[in-house]
Image: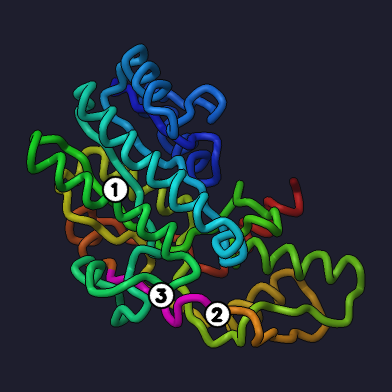
Amino acid sequence: MKKILITGAKGFLGKHVTELLKDKYELLTPSKERLDVTSLKNLNEYIFYHKPDCVIHLAAVCGGIGANQKSPADFFLKNSQMSLNILSSCNILNIKKLITLGSVCSYPKFTPVPFKEEDIWNGYPEETNAPYGIAKKNLLVGCKAYNDQYGSNFIHLIPVNMYGEYDSFDPEKSHVIPALLKKFIEAKERNKPSVTVWGDGSASREFLYAGDCAKAIELSIEGYNSPEPMNIGTGQEISIKDLVVLIKDIVGYQGEVNFDESKPNGQPRRCLDTSKAKKELNFVAETTLEKGLEKTYNWYINE
């Protein structure tokens, strides 16, 4: 049985990946207190001692537009440090395979829709999350550089915006779906007459249920061995305005919705071309947005 180290195993996506792989592999799932990926010394010592066959690098400092605007230097520095450290350590200690996860935030602000992997270098990312997106590009560059120079088997997957159980509902850190769910749930509980949403609602997004992303990662353990990036998503987009209506209905909120146009929309459109994942991994996301939102809502209410 292969031994796999999952960095960020206690995080949102990490919990989904751990749940999916726990009966198939021997997993190393250290907390961030036990394994600090921003420390090369700590990382080298952990990998040297435990000797995993494969590393799945999920650890990241991330959040929504507000968090990106508040702490751009932290997002850039800490994610860059982790990217460089994981590449260096896995090379020095001869890890057979490294699976890294990038971000849709790495794509240029005005990428033609749907985003194709080869478009990722054709412009600067959307300004509010560019430091994070560029830090994640280090992984893409590094995977190819190490593969070219050392013959490493380092791969790079680019998931679209994710959601699902275990997501952060902290208003300071949350992405759009948990932020909206929390707003509507609290408004319903407190009988608020209206809810205010950031932006004008015109931006579009593609959303991937985290359990489906975990499946793509599982398939890539054996099924993908190229440093060229691969999009992971559903290939379907929805406007923020329509997403708001969907979440409002799932929660059962009866009040009004106001859009605060003084707040940023973020990138105008996001939707990935997922044909490569279908061809290379036979991966197709199975969870519809409605079903995934219901699962996330029910998890949050029960928690």
Q: Residues within 10 Å of mark 3 (few under 14, many from 20)?
A: many
- Span of residues in magenta: 265-273
Instruction: Find out whether residue 270 is within the magenta segment.
Output: yes
Q: Are marks 3 and 2 in contact (CB under 8 Å)?
A: no
Element at label 3: loop
When the figure is inspected, residue 120 is found, relative to residue 84, above or below; the finding is below
Name which residue type carries label 1.
Leu
Q: Residue 139 — which label?
A: 1
Q: Position of residue 228 (x, y in %)?
A: 17, 54
Quadrant for the N terminus in the image: top left
Residue in the image at 62% along x and 82% along y: 199
- How busy is the neighbourhood of tag 1: few (under 14 within 10 Å), some, or many (20 plus)? many
Instruction: Please give the count of numbered marks on the rendered protein.
Output: 3
Residue placed furthest toward the top = 49
Spatial CA distance of label 3 from label 1 is: 21 Å
At x 38%, y 67%, the residue is: 234
Report the residue marked by disc 3. Answer: 270
Task: From the top left corner, tell me how far across and down residue 297 is, in percent.
Answer: 68, 59
